[in-house]
Amino acid sequence: MSLAPPPRVRKLQDALHAKAKGSPDYRFYALYDKVYRADVLLYADQRSRENKGSVGVDGQTFADIEAYGAERWLSELSQELRAKSYRPQAVRRAWIPKADGGQRPLGIPTIKDRVVQTAAMLVLEPIFEADLPPEQYAYRRGRDAREAVKAVRALLASGHTQVVDADLKGYFDSLPHPDLLKTVARRVSDKHMLHLIKMWLKAPVQEMRRREDVQKPPDSDGPKDRGAPQGSPISPLLANLYMRRFILGWKQFGYEAKWRARIVNYADDFVICCRGSAEPARAAMQSIMTRLKLTVNEAKTHIRRLPGEHFDFLGYTFGRCYQFGTGKPYYGMFPSKKRVQRFCQSLNEAMARNRTWMETEDLVRQVNRKLTGWANYYCLGTVSRTYGLVDGHARNRLRQWLRAKMAWTAKQAHRVPNVVMHQTYGLTQLQARRRNLSWAPA
């Protein structure tokens, strides 16, 4: 659970949100001084510690800050911001494997930059939250991916069964700085706040050599005029603001009404659910994205016509389902095959033979955390069959792990009943968990 803001910070956020909500055309001119307020910086530091994260290019850790004196460190940071001498350092770049075999760049700012970005986000977020349309579900208080999944299911049930399943190429890396800054300036006239955001966007990116832990030279591909590092605290807000332009354009050009085409957006993922034809909706979407200087991934953008076809969105597969007992068809969803396979692979790694040095109780506790966390998200739609498959896979992997640890024969491992895996060894059973949750959707 995210750390709740202290009363004075909450009061500031409420006041900013109320002003933004009540005056849609108002531009905020005095925000920078809120960033270096002692209570805002302290809360930003607490949020950064809660999120943990890797070290930046300077190698500084929270333990180093504690040794130096956290209160002294925050006071000096406040003075640096007040004197306008603060300058962000380079962003460390790491690479995260993607399901399709590619890699996703992840930006890791220094702790100092993370704290200042979080402080700025605390001030800016309540202002722009008043402007974000209901179609956007990511990085917003009271909204999450599950709410987006429910919204898609509701649209399908209401007849929006022709779907543009869209994909953008490197959305975070493609955000054009001049247009993005204009989007921020629509609500913010404080030049110091705008300069702060511009410095973060222009910060150089540096690779790190893991063995030597030595910085490589900054990227030298010319002027950096695109991208917001995915992983920086301020990037989700900026990404939402720019995607808002697409959603507003969709409505202002009349496409939503013309094709009865509704958008559901989560970060850089979105679908367009249409009651009319999806072909013109796709063409219109591509036209707007071109104007926004974003690139549609043609190979991964498809039109899906239900009930004959299905599509994946936010880890769920949407399509025709059948009610248990009656066989009556309906539009629903279930965990996608790719996500289930990926999770089962993570269970394989958690219960690999090279981990037999662990105590059984500790390993099962780790596996249970993974099972519970996965099921907390994949709890919508038709999940009973999937839960059964995951339960069976988890039991088999634990049997193999116990066989290696206890030097059992294959016959001994095979004879261990399922009930023993759950009741004696304590392995979480997702199907039993579902039966105990009366609120779980059907």
Image (cartoon, rainbow, N blue to C red):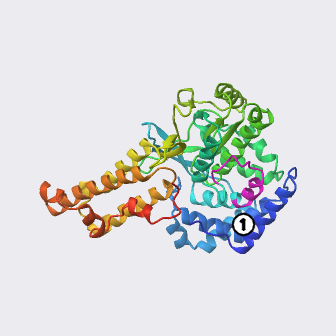
Q: Is residue 208 left or right of residue 363?
A: right
The residue singled out by tag 1 in the image is 79
Q: Is residue 24 above or below residue 220?
A: below
Res. 126 image quadrant: bottom right
**Residue drawn at point x = 58 percent, y = 48 percent:** 149
Magenta span of residues: 122-139
In this view of the protein, which residue sits in the foreground, 76 or 278?
Answer: 278
**Residue drawn at point x = 74 percent, y = 60 percent:** 123
Q: Is residue 31 above or below residue 66?
A: above
At which x and y percent is residue 55? Answer: 50, 57
In this view of the protein, which residue sits in the foreground, 206 or 142?
Answer: 142
* Amino acid at the residue labelled 1: Gln
Q: Is residue 349 left or right of residue 283?
A: left
Q: Is residue 408 above or below residue 305?
A: below
In this view of the protein, which residue sits in the foreground, 5 or 92?
Answer: 5
At which x and y percent is residue 351? Answer: 29, 56
